[in-house]
Amino acid sequence: MKVLNKRIGACAPLVLAASLFWHQSASAGLINSDFANEFDHWNGEVVSYNYLADMDNVDSGDITASYVDNFSTSAGSATLTTSFDDENDYWSVVLFQDFTFDIVAPGNSLTLSLDVSYSLTDDFFDYAFVELLDLDDNLAAIDLTSGGAFDVTDWSGVNASIQFGVIDGDFDVFDSITISNLTITETATDVPEPTSVALLLSGLLLLARQRWLGKTVTRADKHTHNKVGA
């Protein structure tokens, strides 16, 4: 019987190294983010415990089709699930994709949005996560587990990896995590149309001219009044 610290202890380095170990060349922009083509361009990692050998095995790469009980897609979402069979306990399931953020136009912003839900049999021993990693700087990461919208403007042109997974630590499997509505959107800065700018400048020039004319008339009136008084 394996012990808990063996399972959890083996997990941390595997999860953090998954995309870096299998990284080859990042795609230009996130591909198949809505999972319309199932797991095309996505890679997986499964850590399983074999009962007879009393040891963990790691399988990583283009493996999702080989683990249908652990990887599934539906209606623009992907779900990862821990499971077991007669010989193995599949206790860590990770999905990731390496890609390069598009370069953002000057002044524009970049937003990564997603929805995340998960179900754990034990909130203390089990673990679910989603994170964004900088492949050129291993110290840079954003925790996306809460879901929502994240400002990633500073990631313009960066080689990155997005990965999410679920880890069973209490020996009670069928923990799961689902990610959906994953998008990366560039938002243009509001800039007035050329015609609007021209109209604005024209209005300012007209206002300035009227003020200048008003001052000129006032000075002329004062000059006339002074002459009459003399």
Image: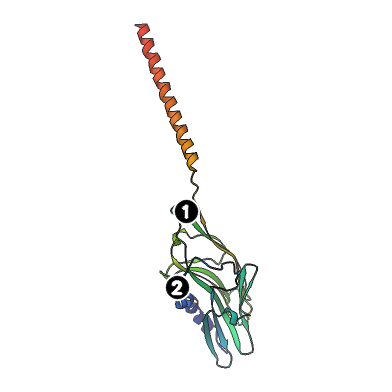
Residue in the image at 52% along x and 66% along y: 30
**In this view of the protein, can residue 103 be seen by the observer?**
yes
Q: Determine whether the residue tagged by mark 1 lies in a helix, strand or loop.
A: loop
Q: CA distance from mark 2 to mark 1?
A: 26 Å
Image-based side of 187 in relation to 179, left or right: left
- Mark 1: amino acid: Asn
- Residue 25 image label: 2
Q: Position of residue 58 (x, y in %)?
A: 52, 84
Residue in the image at 60% along x and 87% along y: 88
Q: Determine whether the residue tagged by mark 2 lies in a helix, strand or loop.
A: loop
- Residue 75 image label: none
Residue sitting at the far right: 75
The answer to which quarter of the image holds residue 105 is: bottom left
Number of on-image labels:
2
- Residue 108 image label: 1
The answer to which quarter of the image holds residue 25 is: bottom left
Does the CB distance between marks 2 and 1 fall below 8 Å?
Answer: no
Q: Position of residue 111 (x, y in %)?
A: 52, 59
Identify the image quadrant of the C terminus. top left
Q: Position of residue 185 (x, y in %)?
A: 53, 59
**In this view of the protein, can residue 115 be seen by the observer?**
no
Local crowd size for mark 2, using a 10 Å CA cut-off: few (<14), some (14–19), many (≥20) = few
Residue in the image at 45% along x and 62% along y: 155
Depth check: give the residue in front, 113 or 191: 191
User: In the image, is residue 153 above or below residue 90?
Assistant: above
Depth check: give the residue in front, 154 or 174: 154
Residue sitting at the far bottom: 52
